Amino acid sequence: MLSNVRVFLRILQRQKLFSVINLLGITVSMTSAVLIYLYVSHELSYDSFHQHTDRLYRVNQTFIWAQNEESQFSRTGPGVAHALKEELPEVELITSIHTPGNFIVSYVEPDGDVISFEEDKVLAADTNFFKVLNFPLVAGNEVTALREANQLVMTRSAAKKYFGTTDPIGKMVTLGGLRGSEAKTFEVTGVIEDVPENSTIHFDILLSTRSFPAIENRYWSWVWTQLETFVLLRPDADIEAVREKLKDIPRKRADESIRAAMGVSYDEYIKSGKNWDLFLQPITKLHIPETPVAGSFSDIASVKVIYSFVGAAVFVVLLSCINFMNLSTAQFTKRIREAGIRKILGMDKNRLRLTFFFEALAFCLIALIISLALIQMLLPAFNAVAGKHLKLSLWQQPTLIIVMLLLALFMALVSSIYPAISLASFNPVNALRGKSKAGNTGRAFRNGLVVFQFSVSIVLIICTSIVFQQLRYVSEKDLGFDKENLIVLHHAEAVAHIETLTNALISSAGVLNASWCSSVPPDLYGGDSFSVEGIGDKKLALNFAMIDANYIPTLNIRLKFGRNFRPDSPSDSNRVILNESAVRSIGWSVDESTLGKFVTYPNSGSGFARFEVIGIVSDFNYWSIENAIEPMAMFNMGNKYIRDSDRDYIVIKARRSDMEAWNKLLLSIESTWKTHAKNTVFQYSFVDENFEETFATQRQFGKILTVMATLAIVIAALGLLGMVVFSLEQRTKEIGIRKVSGASVANILSLITRGYMRLILIAFIFSAPVAWYCMQLWLKDFVYRIAPSPWTFIGAGTATVVIALCITLYHSLKAALTNPVDVLRDE
């Protein structure tokens, strides 16, 4: 062992260039691999902290509000939970979660001071919540904490924000801001630990569902899809048998809801080509679903992204191992005599191979120590790119220590196996005479490694380029309205006179227009079924929003036929504007013949809930552009029959200006808000930024993929450097003879470089189809997507050739300019 250490130190001293390149490649690959491991292991750990995760599921259903009903929807009606209780004896416990939205929460201190915050992580749950899901209380009783109306539970951080170190149990807080209702007082009945970061279900405040009478009033409904339903199966339950039983439950229990909402029976609904199925989604698959699921919780990752990161990390590690092989083999002519002497002195092949393995392991262990320091330095930047809060703590992550040691052993084994076999399999006598041919063996294998390296690099370059082209495309795509310079003011429902505030904002300097509405893209909350002329007793599912007369001009939505609402026309409260998709879904013509027809809201039971169609607007993306445009209706804010949510907004169209003018405008808007909204929290957002957030995960994917592609091309370049040095050492005399025979420098450069260009061409031929296939899989997630251009592939291949030429030309030119006398004097 000691002799091996001395030999390794001698190698570091004598072969500084190769040692630095080896350490650099291995360190870079280890650092990237460990960072990806931290990221992926965190993603895979989501919701694993719950008890009984092997029998805990969320109940999804067919996405009935979308035309593509093959997708799943995580939100169900209250009737689903009631049906499961009665139809599935395999169910041990059921809990339902409601997502009521944001609230302004206030606490009046004993001295009269008011502490008020907007809470955007508010959920409501029933009394089974703490029995099914593992969110332990640190204060309060889990049995009674959510038993009655107007009770709530806070996280430890939220309780500290309002009450400091005072015991919060029994304290009263006010939740305000719902449209058409007074603020309500809630009692704090429990405190839980802060929700773990790796939880898909995030909340700071948990209300009792009894605080929302609509949930109990619609206990029978399968159509009022406002709940997320979770079931805990019994230990002896057969999951496949449960899934089979789920197939019959909608037919048996949903018929009443479908008749009331759709005007048809369940059988007629299915015969029309639609589906209504229930699905069980494991709790540990909420964050990374196996199939796309639309719903309430936004912290969703893509399984394709996870696989891509794992694949990229594996390939980067393999590339650095290949480099080690090539560089070790490139030193063959320098170490062949050393190995020959060792064999003559009695060292057998296996011990000689272990010597090379020890050298590789020493490199890997040194690189491991360096990479630990690099990871600590790079983690903040990596977290910023990935949007995570990952930490490196070896004492708290013993699994990570094992993973890193196994990584070092794996890399050492892979890196040393070919050099060990090559350098140990030769005749020592021939080696001492300088006649060993071992250095000429395995050329095809080494060339294959170079092809593999550049194939991986080209695939990553092409994929990175296409990812950013797609993201640029969706960022610049025409959404059917103008998303630029649109400011959204939240909590308008808490303002006593919203129309007065809207008019005041319109008159503000820098404001072009303003509108009072219930939804602003990319968020739309309303959805229900309607009766329409021409389809008999059947009913049509429509998404909808409530708007005023300024909405269409403020968003610059294109009005194709008919007219907009008029602010001076009270009768417009019983009129509706449809988008093109809604008109087509009904079966009407997208022209003026549709104007004057009626859409009826059946749930009101009143003849006054007939809405005359007065306009048709062009389709526009009111959800994320990853979703297709669905049928949509826009009702007047003055109508008395339809409400999509308890939230109101004011959307402002601002004049284009510089940053200083923007700051002045925002201050002016805030001042106007405070004048009319009094103590209501001033909160705003921008529509274009909200759309950007809908594919933030894909942007993170693009950034990390760029880093991995850069690392891959750098490591591949180092590998090519090793091959060039190796080749030149083997062909030194050949080059000398060619020069003596009259070959020019250009001839020699062409001789040396064209072989490597041929390898890169082969790599391109292999990699282009692979990259195209991978990107087709990724692009399938987008409704609107690019067709990858051939120039993207050509550009990636050209860039790789240029990089390779830069590497090979320097060493090739140096060899070509060498005096042939210096290399042929011993012949």
Image (cartoon, grey):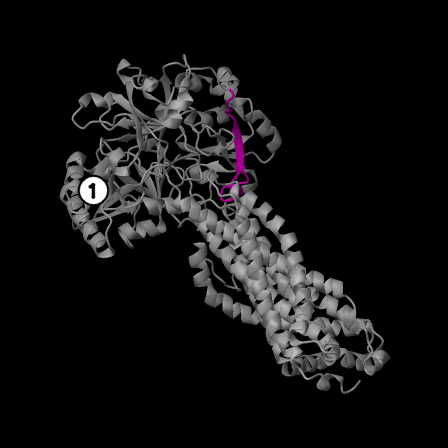
Magenta range: 273-291
Judging depth in this view, the residue of 102 and 525 nearest the camera is: 525
Q: Which residue bears the numbered disc 1? A: 512
Is residue 86 something that shows in the picture?
Answer: yes
Judging depth in this view, the residue of 181 and 375 nearest the camera is: 375
Q: Residue at x 25, y 26 (%)?
A: 563
Instruction: Give the total number of marks visible in the rendering.
Output: 1
Residue 39 magenta: no
Judging depth in this view, the residue of 50 and 401 nearest the camera is: 401
Q: Is residue 468 left or right of residue 319?
A: left
Q: In terms of secondary structure, where does tag 1 sit?
A: strand
In the rendered structure, which amino acid carries the disc numbered 1?
Leu
- Residue 241 occupies quadrant: top right
Q: Position of residue 566 (x, y in %)?
A: 20, 27
Q: Outermost residue, front direction?
A: 742
Residue 287 magenta: yes
Q: Please, is residue 233 above or below residue 612 in the view?
A: below
Q: Position of residue 297 (x, y in %)?
A: 42, 41
Q: Position of residue 236 (x, y in %)?
A: 61, 34
- Residue 808 occupies quadrant: bottom right
Q: Residue at x 70, y 72 (%)?
A: 727
Q: Position of residue 134 (x, y in %)?
A: 46, 44
Q: Please, is residue 700 above or below residue 433 in the view?
A: above
Is residue 359 something that shows in the picture?
Answer: no
- Residue 764 occupies quadrant: bottom right
Q: Please, is residue 788 above or below residue 542 in the view?
A: below
Q: Residue at x 32, y 44 (%)?
A: 687
Q: Residue at x 44, y 15 (%)?
A: 264
